[in-house]
Image: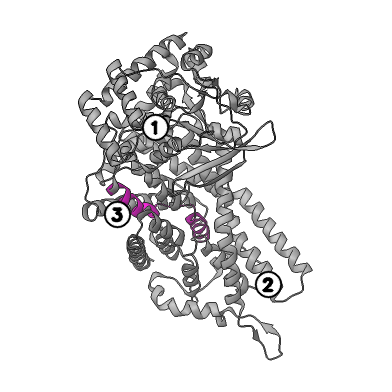
């Protein structure tokens, strides 16, 4: 056991632990908002990086590595964790997070880290659950038996975090732990001899050698051909096995746990949760409850967000009115007021609803409920050729298809992974919400359905169901035709129910909204300015020489009328046509496009909201343009069309091919056109 001093050298902390152990909550608590996200070098697996201020004044990075159960794993995120640990710099330190309720399971991973010779500090989480369940852990004894410093915290409430931060500012307290198991004398002698022959003199290389000897093939490629031959010969002579190593580890772990953990009372507090699981994991009621919760979420998106949306709308209108009053009339004023502020503001107004969506999804994830939904949905997914592992990326598409497609890297089976990538964009994403909410609010009334449900919320929920069902149907189609490899089995551990950390949820909501504004906001601003230009120009003059902007004579109208014959059978006019083109940059741009077009068109008239302007719009024959049938046609088109260049770009990167994004764009656009055509044409037969 060594005392690891940083020697004034630069180092970083690696936050490591099992999935659902409270690692991310602790990370948020330690770093606050001093975080950034990015991808690990060479792969599109997301990493979170935060900073901790040291006593010396310098900042030390802390990396939140993907959750893993061991240093082995076939999925890309598990490989990232293994790679970062085994290739860490000499001065880097590991903060190992253990779920105190599942301490034996976590110990399997910890013993592997100890064997690599890494300097480690252990953090036990779920302190509140320990007290509730009457479990007592002797921290001093645990430190003595492992040789590691140990802290126990409640990451959600912050209890114990201040003491942890104090020790993190003293990196010299990190230790290389005591190895808790050993080979028999003959095996140890063979390993020592082989280590000398291969010039192995550090713990990481020794760990890789032992892993190779017991048959972990992912470590075999670390050695050159002569070394591989020597290792294989020793392995054959002594018959090293993974089972033997596992038994040795398990015996050592049980000895430690038996000396450190005591139960002071019976575990009766979990009975209620076990009864809850009987319902939530039921093949019928489990799915019914999930769909009911999602329906309630969409109802609340309209009711709870109405007031803050009105405030934002009024605020944007006030800014526009103020600037109009102080700026001289002309193109510059119109560009700033109608183009930049009007275009971006039309999308910003939907932030309350997006925030609520991210908040409710965060609640389900943090409480442990989402894992149960995945378990229940595995049976449904299996009927469509997919596994429950595909459900989490699919559901995360409700936020954005881009990280959902990247999240498919956690699926080991290539066939399942490719099918998931191809159908993920069909799930209703947050970029569609501004479009859906605008159209639904314009063409459907706010009346109640069955005296209970909001009609607008019900339509939004139906769009969610449409995306989910269609993605499953096309998943089955892809699995039966292109990706015929057998689906992998689905195995997961259900986490214990936890009280959600509202700090962690709010930080995640903030980071997602910030990312939305920084990425989509910039695109919307640029396109809004371009749209304003083509909708405002060429400038027309009347007989008296006064400027008269007629949008029907603008560049935008010319572009829209060029494609109007193609989209007219869908119930769309040239204005909607322009919004379809611009929304390819980002779906939510459709809202700003319509805002700019109607703003320019209504210039000089009494100001009305965008939804009111849409309701007042008419076709060439004088009939209303925005009818419920037209609205449904647009909703269906946006539900299926591949209106997102960022999604296609990430599919290109994930598949390392231009073929699959081309296939995705072609099948989704064709599906969107045909479905929208059927909705509009059949719908008009009943009017």
Magenta region includes residue 664: no
Note whether 201 is above or below 681 in the view shown.
above
Q: How many marks?
A: 3
Residue 498, image x, y percentages: 48, 27
What residue is pinned by disc 3? 474
Magenta region includes residue 433: yes
Local crowd size for mark 3, using a 10 Å CA cut-off: few (<14), some (14–19), many (≥20): some
Query: What predominant SS class does the magenta segment belong to?
Result: helix
Quick one: SS at disc 3? Answer: helix
Quick one: SS at disc 1? Answer: helix
The reply to whether the C-beta atoms of the residues labelled 2 and 1 are less than 8 Å apart is no
Determine which of the numbered discs, if any, sits on residue 205 in the image: 1
Note whether 610 is above or below 451 in the view shown.
below
Chosen colour scheme: one colour
Q: Reading the chain from its start, which is encountered first: label 2 or label 3? A: 2
For the record, the magenta segment spans: 415-444
- Residue 163 appears in the picture as rendered: yes
Q: Nearer the viewer, residue 675 or 270?
A: 270
Tell me which corner region of the image, top left, top right, bottom left or bottom right, holds residue 62: top right
Q: Nearer the viewer, residue 446 or 148?
A: 148
Residue 82, image x, y percentages: 41, 36
Q: What whole-number distance in Å separates the C-alpha atoms at marks 3 and 1? A: 46 Å
Q: What whole-number distance in Å separates the C-alpha atoms at marks 2 and 3? A: 46 Å
Residue shown at 38% from the left, 43% from the top: 76
Determine which of the numbered discs, if any, sits on residue 334 in the image: 2
Q: Reading the chain from its start, which is encountered first: label 3 or label 1? A: 1
Q: Nearer the viewer, mark 3 or mark 1?
A: 1
Q: Nearer the viewer, mark 2 or mark 1?
A: 1
């Amino acid at each position: 056991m060594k005392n690891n001093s940083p020697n004034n050298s630069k180092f970083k902390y690696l936050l490591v632990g099992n999935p659902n152990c409270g690692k991310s909550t602790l990370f948020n608590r330690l770093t606050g908002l001093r975080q950034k996200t990015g991808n690990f070098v060479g792969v599109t697996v997301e990493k979170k990086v935060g900073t901790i201020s040291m006593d010396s004044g310098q900042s030390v990075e802390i990396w939140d590595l993907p959750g893993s159960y061991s240093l082995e794993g076939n999925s890309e995120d598990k490989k990232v964790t293994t790679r970062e640990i085994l290739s860490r710099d000499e001065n880097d330190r590991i903060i190992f997070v253990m779920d105190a309720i599942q301490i034996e399971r976590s110990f399997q991973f910890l013993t592997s880290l100890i064997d690599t010779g890494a300097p480690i500090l252990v953090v036990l989480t779920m302190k509140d659950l320990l007290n509730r369940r009457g479990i007592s852990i002797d921290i001093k004894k645990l430190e003595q038996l492992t040789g590691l410093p140990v802290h126990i915290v409640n990451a959600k409430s912050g209890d114990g975090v201040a003491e942890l931060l104090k020790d993190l500012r003293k990196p010299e307290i990190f230790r290389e732990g005591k190895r808790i198991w050993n080979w028999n004398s003959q095996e140890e002698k063979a390993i020592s001899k082989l280590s000398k022959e291969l010039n192995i003199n550090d713990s990481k290389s020794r760990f890789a050698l032992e892993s190779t000897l017991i048959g972990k093939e992912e470590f075999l490629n670390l050695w050159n051909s002569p070394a591989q031959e020597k290792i294989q010969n020793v392995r054959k002579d002594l018959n090293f096995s993974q089972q033997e190593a596992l038994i040795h580890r398990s015996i050592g772990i049980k000895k430690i746990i038996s000396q450190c953990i005591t139960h002071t009372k019976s575990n009766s507090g979990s009975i209620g949760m076990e009864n809850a699981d009987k319902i939530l994991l039921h093949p019928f009621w489990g799915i019914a409850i999930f769909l009911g919760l999602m329906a309630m979420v969409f109802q609340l998106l309209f009711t709870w967000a109405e007031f803050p949306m009105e405030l934002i709308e009024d605020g944007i209108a006030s800014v526009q009115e103020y600037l109009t009053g102080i700026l001289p009339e002309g193109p510059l004023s119109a560009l700033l007021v109608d183009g930049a502020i009007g275009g971006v503001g039309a999308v910003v107004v939907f932030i309350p609803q997006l925030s609520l969506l991210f908040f409710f999804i965060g609640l389900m994830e943090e409480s442990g409920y989402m894992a149960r939904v995945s378990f229940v949905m595995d049976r449904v997914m299996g009927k469509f050729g997919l596994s429950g592992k595909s459900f989490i990326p699919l559901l995360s598409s409700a936020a954005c298809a881009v990280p959902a497609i990247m999240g498919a890297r956690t699926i080991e089976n290539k066939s399942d992974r490719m099918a998931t990538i191809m159908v993920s964009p069909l799930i209703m994403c947050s970029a569609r919400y501004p479009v859906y909410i605008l159209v639904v609010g314009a063409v459907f009334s706010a009346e109640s359905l069955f005296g209970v449900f909001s009609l607008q919320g019900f339509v939004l929920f139906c769009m969610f169901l449409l995306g989910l069902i269609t993605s499953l149907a096309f998943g089955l189609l892809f699995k039966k035709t292109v990706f015929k490899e057998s689906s992998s089995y689905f195995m997961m551990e259900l986490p214990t129910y936890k009280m959600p950390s509202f700090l962690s949820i709010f930080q995640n909501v903030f980071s997602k909204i910030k990312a939305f504004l920084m990425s989509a906001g910039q695109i919307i601003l640029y396109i809004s300015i371009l749209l304003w230009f083509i909708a405002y120009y060429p400038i027309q003059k009347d007989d008296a020489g006064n400027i008269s902007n007629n949008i029907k004579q603008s560049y935008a109208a010319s572009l829209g009328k060029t494609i109007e014959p193609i989209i007219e059978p869908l119930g769309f006019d040239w204005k909607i046509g322009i919004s379809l083109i611009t929304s390819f940059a980002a779906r939510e741009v459709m809202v700003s496009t319509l805002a700019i077009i109607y703003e320019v068109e209504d210039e000089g008239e009494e100001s009305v909201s965008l939804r009111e302007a849409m309701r007042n719009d008419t076709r060439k024959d004088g009939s209303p343009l925005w009818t419920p049938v037209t609205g449904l046609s647009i909703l269906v088109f946006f539900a299926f069309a591949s209106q997102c260049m960022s999604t296609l770009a990430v599919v290109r990167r994930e598949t390392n091919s231009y073929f699959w994004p081309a296939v995705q764009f072609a099948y989704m656009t064709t599906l969107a056109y045909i479905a929208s055509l059927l909705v509009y044409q059949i719908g008009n037969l009943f009017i």
